[in-house]
Amino acid sequence: MLKDGQLLSLAQNNPAGLILQKPYYAEYIGPGAAIGGMFDLQCVTIHTLGKAELTVPETLDERQDAFQRRMEDIEKMQQICEQDLPIERAVAVLEMLSQHFHQEEIQTISNDILAKLVGVLPSTMAAAWQQLSHSNRQRNLSPQPSQEEAALASHEVAFA
């Protein structure tokens, strides 16, 4: 359907995502985002995260919403790609994906494909997995913050 140029969208109600592999890069598509149309004619493979369900946006409003969500996904990835150091980009994309999916599920996608999301080498993505695993272990060893500290920390992240 993608090769035919049909416009679809990823269902909003499912916590799912798609990674579209193109010849030289990959794109992340989140819930509600447009897929197909003239954007994805060069798609080589599709990798799913979660239970992906595709819908056909029929009305003008549905199509506009799907395009808007696609643009938001592109902007998120652009922000990650603006980081200078490749390891920071690799860790950031893993952290972003980990907010929506279990790490075990993300690990089913090859480092080669994940690396193409943010323009790094697969070996850099492997190092990012190690760094993320190490930081998660450190968090589990440190004392748990109070609810007030957790609320303040979430506000800091939201405004960063």
Image: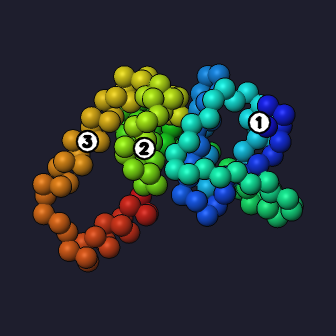
Residue, disc 3? 133
As helix, strand or loop, the secondary structure at mark 1 comes to loop
Graded by Cα atoms within 10 Å as few (under 14), some (14 to 19) or many (20 or more), the crowding at tag 3 reads few
Name the amino acid type tagged 3. Answer: Ser
Q: Residue at x 79, y 62 (%)?
A: 62
Name the amino acid type tagged 2. Answer: Glu
Name the amino acid type tagged 1. Answer: Leu
Seen in the image, is 8 located left or right of residue 87?
right
As helix, strand or loop, the secondary structure at mark 2 comes to helix
Residue, disc 2? 105
In front: label 2 or label 3: 2
Residue at the bottom extreme? 148
**Residue 12 lies in quadrant:** bottom right
Of pointers 2 and 3, the one earlier in the residue sequence: 2
Residue, disc 1? 2
Per the model, the C-alpha gap separating discs 2 and 3 is 15 Å
The residue closer to the viewer here, 60 or 106, is 106
Residue 47 in view: yes
As helix, strand or loop, the secondary structure at mark 3 comes to helix
Residue 115 in view: no
Seen in the image, is 143 located left or right of residue 136?
left
x, y (%) of residue 73? 60, 49
